[in-house]
Image: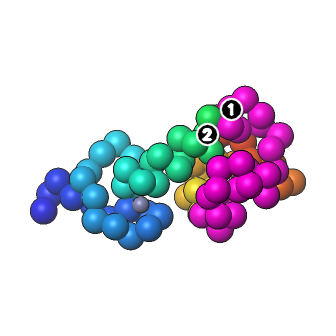
Amino acid sequence: MGNYQICDFCGNLTEKNYIKMCADCEEMYNKIRSIVEVHPDTIVLDLSNQTGISVSRILSFVRNGYFTMKEGNVEVRK
Ligand SMILES: [Zn+2]
């Protein structure tokens, strides 16, 4: 079982990798990241509309430290 981990975001059992999330969540993360890298002033609602990812899921990425949020704008963590 040493090669598996529980995904931080959806609770799925997933193969261990360099970040604590499964492939599905990593795909969401990359989707969000690709937008906020180009548009760091995107508010969370627009981000949700553009990606189809729920606001609560985006906020859980923020809570887990993958992004930072300032006055509703999501930014890539530096
Ligand atoms: Zn997941």
Alpha carbon of mark 1 to alpha carbon of mark 2: how far? 6 Å
> What residue appears at the point 65 percent right and 50 percent down from the top-left corner?
51
> What residue appears at the point 61 percent right and 39 percent down from the top-left corner?
33
On the picture, is 40 further left or further right than 58? Answer: right
- Amino acid type at mark 1: Glu
Q: Position of residue 66 (x, y in %)?
A: 57, 48
On the picture, is 40 further left or further right than 21? Answer: right
Q: Position of residue 68 (x, y in %)?
A: 69, 48
Q: Which residue is mark 1?
A: 37
Q: Quadrant of ligand 1?
A: bottom left
Is residue 52 inside the magenta stretch? yes
Mark 1: give few (<14), some (14-19) or many (20+) Cα within 10 Å: some
Q: Which residue is mark 2?
A: 33
Quarter of the rendering containing residue 48: bottom right
Q: Are marks 1 and 2 in contact (CB under 8 Å)?
A: yes
Q: Is residue 59 above or below residue 77?
A: below
Residue at the left extreme of this rendering:
1
Q: Is residue 69 visible?
A: no
Q: Which residues are magenta?
A: 35-59
Q: Is residue 49 above or below residue 56?
A: above
Question: The N terminus lies in which quarter of the figure?
Answer: bottom left
